Image: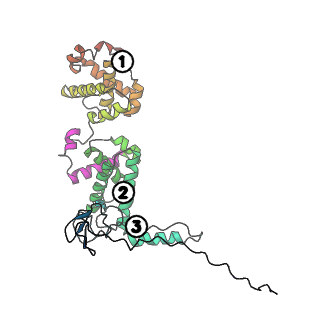
């Protein structure tokens, strides 16, 4: 008589599949010398597997799996570190690796305290002020749609001004605005004082003081940008034409004729003493009427940032000496027609 077992036996264990492993019975031998224990040399520089006995190349696609102890710094030092972002020359002498502390702390507020402690311990007060100014420069250049090259030039100017204490006591926003203004001039994409003031909300008087101080300290007057814009350091009307014509969607030949009109007017002393913005706006209005391009004076006024009366005033000065400004070649080629110039606007 069979009795049931009080505790049933556990089910037999299942056989587990063997994990993947290389087949050690496979050996790599040289096909030429047939040595059972060949000496295989790995030449990682050429990516080849070479037989040490006869020199036969057994493979030509070998991947170097060794540690790469090379340095990618500008100066060939002994530091093989490859962690972190690329070194920033503007932050030379400063710790460029940051420690980021998360915000999730369960509502205890410990994360905020840790962030403050880490900020105080990592950078000194001068370094924190410099990093804050760099962030403001990048932000304002992005709002102005300026390229990174201008942002880097402005940062270099600000760092030098900060190190040499050139503008001690001046507002930080005014110093940054002056650096951006100079950087735009050096990159040949000048902006007017009014545009910089509208962007940074700095008064024109304070911006002019900071600009004059930096211009004298950096000796910028003999530079190429000053030669293009005049000895006073103000952006010339030719520098503003490209941007204004692009915003107005004018054909390329209109911009070329506007430039010739401005150059001829300067040679004959027409509209001397007027601001470059007014001259650029008046020249665009004069050229559009001369070439028969439909463009309202209101649109030109909005782009140039000057009143319609100022543009018409410059136009009247150009109209009075139109014979000196309009080339005969333009009329012969059929590009220009002085009969298109309205007489009533010149009164």
SS of the residue under disc 1: helix
Residue contact at pointers 3 and 2, CB within 8 angstroms: no
Q: Position of residue 12 (x, y in %)?
A: 64, 78
Between marks 3 and 2, how big is the CA–CA gap?
16 Å
Name the side, left or right, on which 303 lies relative to 269: right
Residue 275 in view of the camera:
no
Foreground disc of the pair 1, 2 = 2
> Which quarter of the rendering shows the N terminus?
bottom right
Mark 2 element type: helix
Q: List the residue tagged with mark 3.
A: 98
Residue lying at 30% horizontally and 22% vertically, measured from the top left: 287
Q: Earlier in the sequence, mark 1 or mark 2?
A: 2
Q: Residue beneath label 2, please?
A: 134
Residue 269: x and y in percent read 20, 27
Q: Of label 3 and label 2, which has the lower sequence position?
A: 3
**Looking at this rendering, what residue extends furthest in the right direction?**
1
The outermost residue toward the top is 339
Q: What's drawn in magenta, residue-wise?
A: 204-232
Q: Nearer the viewer, mark 1 or mark 3?
A: 3
Q: Which mark is residue 345?
A: 1
Residue 228 belongs to the span the image colors magenta: yes
**The one of 129 and 317 positioned closer to us in this rendering:** 129
Between 84 and 58, the one lying in front of the other is 58
Judging from the image, the colouring scheme is: rainbow
Mark 3 vs mark 2: in front: 3
């Amino acid at each position: 008589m069979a009795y049931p077992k009080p505790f049933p036996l556990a089910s037999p264990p299942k056989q587990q599949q063997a994990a993947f492993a290389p087949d050690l019975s496979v050996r790599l031998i040289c096909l030429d010398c047939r040595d059972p224990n060949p000496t295989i040399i790995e030449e990682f520089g050429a990516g080849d597997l070479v037989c040490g006995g006869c020199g036969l190349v057994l493979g030509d696609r070998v991947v170097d799996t060794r540690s790469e102890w090379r340095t990618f710094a500008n100066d060939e030092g002994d530091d093989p570190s490859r962690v972190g972002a690329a070194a920033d020359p503007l932050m030379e002498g400063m710790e460029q690796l940051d420690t980021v502390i998360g915000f999730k702390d369960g509502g205890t507020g410990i994360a905020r305290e840790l962030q403050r402690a880490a900020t105080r311990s990592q950078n000194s007060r001068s370094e924190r002020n410099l990093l804050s100014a760099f962030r403001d420069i990048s932000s304002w250049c992005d709002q102005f749609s300026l390229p990174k090259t201008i942002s880097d030039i402005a940062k270099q100017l600000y760092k030098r001004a900060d190190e040499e204490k050139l503008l001690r006591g001046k507002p930080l926003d005014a110093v940054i605005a002056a650096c951006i203004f100079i950087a735009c001039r050096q990159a040949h994409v000048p902006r007017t004082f009014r545009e910089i003031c509208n962007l940074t909300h700095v008064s024109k008087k304070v911006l002019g003081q900071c600009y004059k101080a930096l211009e004298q300290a950096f000796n910028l007057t003999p530079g190429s940008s000053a030669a293009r814009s005049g000895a006073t350091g103000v952006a010339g009307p030719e520098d503003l034409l490209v941007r204004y014509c692009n915003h107005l969607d004018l054909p390329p030949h209109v911009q070329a004729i506007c430039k010739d009109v401005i150059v001829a007017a300067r040679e004959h002393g027409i509209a001397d003493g007027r601001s470059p913005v007014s001259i650029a706006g008046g020249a665009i209005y004069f050229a559009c009427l001369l070439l028969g391009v439909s463009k309202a004076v209101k649109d030109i006024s909005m782009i140039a940032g000057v009143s319609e009366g100022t543009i018409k005033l410059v136009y009247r000065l150009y109209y009075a000496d139109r014979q000196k400004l309009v080339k005969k070649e333009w009329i012969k080629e059929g590009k220009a027609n002085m009969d298109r110039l309205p007489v009533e606007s010149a009164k």
